[in-house]
Amino acid sequence: MGLELTQDEKNMLEGKQGKAARKAMEIITTLGEIYGAERLIPIASVQIAGVSYHNLGEAGLEYLDEMAEDGKVRVLTTLNPAGMDLEEWKKHGISEDFAVNQQRVVDAFAKMGVITTCTCTPYLIGNLPHYGEHISWAESSAVCFANSVIGARTNREGGPSALAAALTGRTAEYGFHLEKNRIAEVKYEVKAELQNTDDFGLLGQVIGERTRKKIPYIVGIKRATSEELKSFCASVATYGGVALFHMEGITPDKTSIPDETEIVTDDDLNNARQKLDDENAEIDFISIGCPHASIKEIAHVAELLQNKKVTEGKTVWITTAKPTKDLAIKMGYYDKIEEAGAFLVSDACCAVAPLKGRFKGLMTDSAKACFYARGKNAFKTEIRTIEQCIREATT
Ligand code: F3S
């Protein structure tokens, strides 16, 4: 059976609603045909990735400008981190040239009606789907969080397909939009002790590397905060391409429980930690907020930095969303962080900012940040708790 379209969808495909809507509908229907979808479904929101000019380049920007000529988003749409803090970029050492081009990218999205706050935790700043809602998100950690922790339904979109979904308000019904594809495939019994966000990141690394794309059913975790779950999501998606997991007693979806069982021990976590700890790493960069920090994490860091100074030769970034930074300013956390010599950076992160060559070694509480620091920036890495990161920054 082929893809059946409504009259509104046919109109878009025939160009009756403009050039951008036509191109977008072509992308959506092509994906639908490739994956054997029978229909398109309305979506409630979109998260677009591929926002940093560092990754997009001129070719990507040209495409966006073309879509922005007559394209308008039909649903709530937010952006992934850009390559810089859109306001305070200068003091973070970003070049004027880069800033001009990054702003051109953001302006193109703004012209299409996208909310131009750039964050990988859109669910913390108002792009929050409800259980069972269909969405089209493109940031792997956010996709995993939305599918698993919230129980929304999304595939892991690419930048162009997410933009196409935003411009049409539709996605093709395949993959994780169908209940039959959301069933757990392998059980993980966690016997390791988990205490902090870095432990949850390491757990994501272990399960991600073992499970690859199989949907995990995780047992043995009694409690997990939103911050720990976002760290786990980022990591399991990075190391295994996992876009959905079930965690007994914590995530909302019902599923059958797989027979195949794997055990995760403290030794597994220690091995994962060792893999991320480079020998002789010369730490000159400390970054917290991958995925973007919550206000609770920022308050904690501000408290840790009180009456302390960042050591000369070290740079500290706490990365977050702009609305969260605004709240941090209001609450006095921003001043405490910046007076200590650290930076509260909004809209950007240590993986998508143009930082190559600026630092030698990164210390972070995020397993995902370690992955990109090595792969993209050739930094050495060490993974530690937030408390240890701040101690390293200030002594
Ligand atoms: Fe977010 Fe950047 Fe980490 S996009 S998940 S802070 S690598």
Image: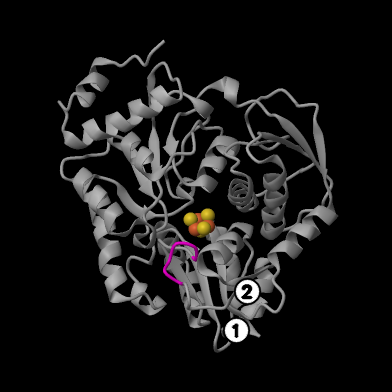
Tag 2 near tag 1, CB within 8 Å: yes
Give left or right: position of 12 versus 342.
left
Task: Provide residue 338's location: percent of width, then percent of height.
Answer: 47, 78
Look at 39% across and 32% down and name the residue there: 44
Magenta-drawn segment:
350-355
Mark 1 surroundings: few (<14), some (14-19) or many (≥20) residues within 10 A = some
User: Dot 2 surroundings within 10 Å: few (below 14), some, or many (20 or more)?
Assistant: some
Q: Position of residue 276 (x, y in %)?
A: 69, 64
Q: Inspect the image, locate mark 2, and give the three-letter code of the amino acid beneath it.
A: Leu
Q: Secondary structure at mark 2?
A: helix
Circle 1 sits in a helix, a strand or a loop, which is it? loop
Majority secondary structure of magenta residues: loop
> Does residue 39 sit above or below 230 in this rendering?
above
From the viewer's side, name the closer residue of 198 and 264: 264
Quarter of the image holding residue 216? top right
Residue at the spot of label 2? 304
Q: In the drawing, what numbered circle is on residue 179?
A: none
| Displayed quadrant of residue 81 | bottom left
Asked whether, in this view, residue 16 is left or right of residue 202, the answer is left
Q: Quadrant of the N terminus?
A: top left
| Some atom of ligand 1 lies within 8 Å of the CB belonging to the residue at label 1 | no
Q: Can you tell which mark lies on residue 308?
A: 1
How far apart are labels 2 and 1 at the CA level? 8 Å
146 is higher (above) or lower (below) than 89: above
* In the image, residue 139 above or below residue 93: above
Residue type, mark 1 in image: Lys
